[in-house]
Image (tube, helix red, strand yellow):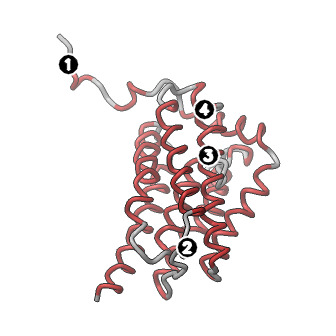
């Protein structure tokens, strides 16, 4: 008789930790030197938070649209799907997130250009730096080759983390609906890395938790 209790998360993974991290080496080798442009794009988000302007904010949403579409296709369709059939179900979510950001960049009317200040801004900037600088260093710190580093706009984890930080920095009510898909991916990658016994499994949920905390603090300040 079929017994569900005999199954663990590891039974649903078709690859090992070595294969998973080797995938990033191949992915980075295929896309280099896109990483240089990707990091510059990430620091553009950083600059927009510090010095917001109507053109800058629209540009940031447009940039995020391109980034999510690029990662959805290049990583999930062309790379991750070769070792994990479930990637085919994640790619459309990244495409949907890209479409949402594209709409936010192109929608008519004046959008809110206001960003939170003080401790909230400092917190989201720390999360953004973790996404842009911390993630690429993880591979080296864990003894992997630097070619296996995960980079914003190339790999999904730092992309989701940076996106949540940017969204948390904004005032208004866009955070919750816009953060749903990034948070879904955070949950998926956390379970995957935990099952693979990868030490960095806590990074994505940490970035998400800090972003949600920053958004909640800012929301509480606005309502008080």
* In-image side of 102 versus 28 (left or right): left
- Which mark, residue 77? 4
Q: What is the C-alpha distance between the residues marked 3 and 2?
A: 25 Å
Q: Does dot 3 land on a helix, a strand or a loop?
A: helix
Q: Nearer the viewer, residue 104 or 5?
A: 104
Q: Earlier in the sequence, mark 3 or mark 4?
A: 3
Q: As rendered, which of 53 and 142 lies closer to the eye?
A: 53
Label 1 sits on residue = 3
Residue at the image position 67 percent from the left and 48 percent from the top:
154
For the point 36% across and 32% down, the residue is 9
> Which residue carries the number 3 mark?
69
Measuring from the top left, give residue 114's x and y in whole percent: 52, 82
**What secondary structure is found at the residue carrying circle 2?**
helix
Residue found at x 51% / y 38%: 92
Labels 1 & 3 near each other (Cβ < 8 A): no
Give the residue at the far right of this rendering. 33
Per the model, the C-alpha gap separating discs 1 and 4 is 33 Å
Which image quadrant is residue 171 in?
bottom left
């Amino acid at each position: 008789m079929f017994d569900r209790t005999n199954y663990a998360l590891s039974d649903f993974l078709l690859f090992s930790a070595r294969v998973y991290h080797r995938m990033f080496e191949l992915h980075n080798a295929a896309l280099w030197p896109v990483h240089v442009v990707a990091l510059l794009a990430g620091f553009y988000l950083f600059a927009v938070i510090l010095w917001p302007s109507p053109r800058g904010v629209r540009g940031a949403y447009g940039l995020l649209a391109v980034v999510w579409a690029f990662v959805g296709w290049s990583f999930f369709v062309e790379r991750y799907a070769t070792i994990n059939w479930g990637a085919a179900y994640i790619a459309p979510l990244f495409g949907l997130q890209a479409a949402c950001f594209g709409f936010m960049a192109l929608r008519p009317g004046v959008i809110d250009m206001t960003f939170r200040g003080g401790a909230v801004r400092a917190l989201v900037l720390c999360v953004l730096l973790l996404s842009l600088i911390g993630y690429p260093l993880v591979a080296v710190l864990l003894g992997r080759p630097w070619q296996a580093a995960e980079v914003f706009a190339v790999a999904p984890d730092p992309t989701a983390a940076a996106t949540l930080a940017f969204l948390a920095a904004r005032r208004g009510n866009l955070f919750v609906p816009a953060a749903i898909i990034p948070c879904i991916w955070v949950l998926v990658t956390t379970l995957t890395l935990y099952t693979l016994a990868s030490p960095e499994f806590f990074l994505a949920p940490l970035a998400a938790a800090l972003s949600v905390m920053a958004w909640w603090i800012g929301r509480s300040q606005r309502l008080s």
